[in-house]
Amino acid sequence: MSAFGGGLGGNGEVCGALIGALATMGLRFGRNREEEKEDPKLSIYTKEVLKHFREEIVKNHSGIRCSEIAGVDWRNPVERANFFKGGAKLMECTRIVGDTARFIGELLERQT
């Protein structure tokens, strides 16, 4: 799932942490075979993930796009290099990934 970083392959699109969370929901509740039906929880939990991500995890940012969250034009090599040198922006992204993973873990634990 590393290709989700930088907003889907370094394009600044939707945050890779959110895409990874939704992919996890699909793996857990989606169909394994064409003839199967999706678990109804898929829709419920994907909506819950998106709501929680917007309202709790990135509430202090202008949106769910990586470029909005990180404040980086990923196509600009100087901005990209500065981001990876560390600092507040990198730490914020690290927090978002961790908070998203924690939320997904808690959500999945409710299933057992």
Image (spheres, helix red, strand yellow):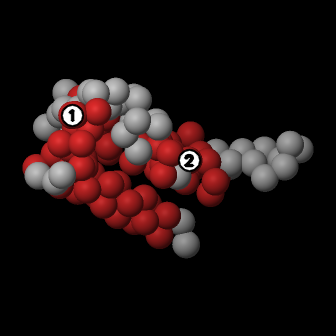
Foreground residue among 11 and 61: 11
Badge 2: residue crowd in 10 Å (few <14, some 14–19, many ≥20): some
Residue tagged 2: 23
Q: Quadrant of the C terminus?
A: bottom right
- The residue drawn where x is 43% and y is 65% is 105
Spot occupied by residue 42 in the image (x, y as percentages of width and height): 59, 46
- The residue drawn where x is 68% and y is 48% is 30
Spot occupied by residue 29 in the image (x, y as percentages of width and height): 64, 52
Vertical comparison of 99 with 37: above or below: below
Looking at the image, which residue sits at the far right?
35
Residue 21 lies left or right of residue 97; in this view the side is: right
Report if residue 39 is visible in the image: yes
Report if residue 48 is visible in the image: no
N-terminal label among 1 and 2: 2
Vertical comparison of 76 with 7: above or below: above
Foreground residue among 12 and 74: 74
Residue tagged 1: 79
**What is the secondary structure assignment of the residue under circle 1?**
helix
Residue 93 lies left or right of residue 23; in this view the side is: left
- Callout in the foreground (1, 2): 1
Q: Amino acid at mark 2?
A: Ala
Spot occupied by residue 73 in the image (x, y as percentages of width and height): 27, 27
**What is the secondary structure assignment of the residue under circle 2?**
helix
Task: Give the CA separation, mark 1 to mark 2.
Answer: 28 Å
